[in-house]
Structures are given as C-alpha cells and as structure tokens.
Amino acid sequence: MSEVLLDVNQLRVTFHGHPAVHDISYRIHAGEIVGIVGESGCGKSLASLTLMGLQPSIMQASGSVTFAGQNILTNTAEQWQKLRGEGIAMIFQEPMTALNPVVTVGDQIAEMFLLHQGDNKAQARQKAIEMLEQVHIPDPLRRAKAYPHELSGGMRQRVMIAMALACRPKLIIADEPTTALDVTVQAQVLDLLEELRETTGTAIQFISHNLGVVSQLADRVVVMYAGRVVEEGTSDQLFSDPQHPYTQGLLATLPRIGHRQARLPAIAGSVPPLGQRSLGCPFVDRCQQAKPLCHQQMPATLPLSNSHSVACHQVEFAHAS
C-alpha cells in the first residue's frame, strides 16, 4: 500500500451548534481513487469543501485533516491559497457556473500558471494549450480562444479537469463531475480521470450519489448518511457484500441488466434535516431492520476486516452472536 496522502480524523463541521458533518474519518493513499457516496444532504460536498478551506464562513470545522504530513485545518489564508491548486485541486459539478463566462478558457487555465508558478503570459498560454491537449480536446490552439458557452458540456468539464491538473496537485476532489453529462460523455470523462491517475499518479476523491459510476472508478468507497460515515470498504467488498442497510438500499435501487422489474425499489423517506437528527442511528427512521436500541444509541464503527468497517447495531449483534 502506498503512503497515506490525506488523513481525515474526526472531522466535524457545525452550523449554529448543529453538526452538518459529524466526526467523519477516512484516509486516501497516494495514487488512490476513493469514492464518497450518499444522497443529497449527506454532507459529502461540505466535507470536501472543508478540505479546501472553502466551507461557508458561518460554519466551524474541528478535528484534524492531515495532508502530506501537515494539519491543514489550522492553515492561514496565505497557506490555503498556496495549497489550492498546488496541493489539492477541485473539479466542480457544473462547469458552466464554475467557469467565468467572459474570459476565454485558455486564459482561465493560464491564470493557474501565472498565480502558482510565476510564468509570464506567453509561457502560461502555451502551457494552457498543452493542458487542453492532455485532456484530449481537439484543436487545442483554437479551443483555448473559446468562451465557455461556445463549448459542449463534455468539453467544459474537460476544461475544468485541465485547470485542476495544471499545477500537478497530489489530490483532486471531483464533486459529481459527470452529473450534468449524458451517458456517453460521462463514460469518456471517467476514462479520462482513470487515465490521468495512471499517467500522473494523482489521487482522486470522487464524490457521487451514483453507485454505478463509482463502481467503475473507485478503489475504495466511503458511504455517508446524515453527515456520518456509515460504511467503508474496497469497491469489491461494498458491491459484493454490503453490510449497512443504507448501502444495501442504495445498491438495490440500481437497475440490473437481465432483470425485468415493473418498478425499481426505493428507500422510503428522506435524509433528516439539520437539527432534526436522532440521538440513535441517523438512518433509523428509514431502516426496515431497526430495533429499539437503534433509536436510543448511536452505533460505534465496527471493523469487519482491515479494509471494511460499518456503523450498525444489527451487524454488531450478528458478529457478537
């Protein structure tokens, strides 16, 4: 196993005393792709923004986040500025809103080199063209002069990937980068991310609510629900032997080739809003296996193996008996 690049330990992000992200812990090794999955409102994106120091100012973060041996939660504004782009970069969900509509895409990529590497304008423009070529955008010299609205959704997402890769970061956080794309373009973007991992050695934290997408890309998967990590394991473990009822429910909603169903299963209910979360298991109101203890006590994280863990009373009972 390669060295630990990112070590998130008991990270908590609170809003007016209510934890939106509740004591989550996980690790990412150098060159590894880790999927963070869960429904909207589970805290995936907020936790990831906190890793970049971009969480809303009204929210307070505690715990520790160690990146390349340094606790980055204590960073100054200047240290955050240096870390973003050079150490950690982010690919946002909707490139049309993430890109500046009145600046050419080439100039937006070139800005990364001007800001972080001190290149002159000519050097930065040439490097921007090279980055567009690296992410397989045809005719990069001409495309560099285009504005975001002149490119397709898939092209814009490739521009975002080029910007993220510009300064050769050790970790890329991809926040649902394929959500707004059709299936064909989505597959191309996933192939590109895998290729870039192989050629550059960059680790990727891939955030998604789509387990089908995550299964194609991730080495390991972290399942979040209501701001907590409920299960973590390798992709093979989670997809072949899911233990938490929430993980099982998510997998059951996936359509399967060769299985004709009049209606796909669904998990009843929704993620509880902030401030209305149970003292016990956060999934208790939607869980068909819930017992009285589940309403009263938060389950501890139970290691099932060196690479697989789950927070569920039912699993704990099964292993104890």
Image: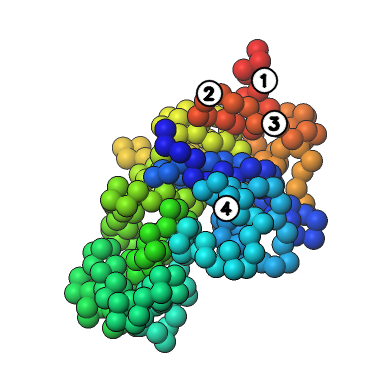
Q: Amino acid at mark 1?
A: Phe
Residue position for label 4: 44
Residue 119 can be seen in this image = yes
Quadrant of residue 282 within the rendered picture: top right
Q: Which circle's residue, 3 or 2, is located before the other in the chain?
A: 3
Name the residue: 71% across, 37% down: 281
Packing grade of label 4 (10 A; few <14, some 14-19, many >=20) is: many
Which callout, 1 or 2, points to the residue nearer the camera?
2
SS for tag 1?
Answer: helix
Between the C-alphas of marks 2 and 4, the distance is 24 Å
Packing grade of label 3 (10 A; few <14, some 14-19, many >=20) is: few
Name the residue: 33% across, 76% down: 124
Residue position for label 2: 305
SS for tag 3?
Answer: loop
Q: Is residue 208 above or below residue 220?
A: below
Residue position for label 1: 317
Which callout, 1 or 4, points to the residue nearer the camera?
4
| Position of the C terminus by quadrant | top right
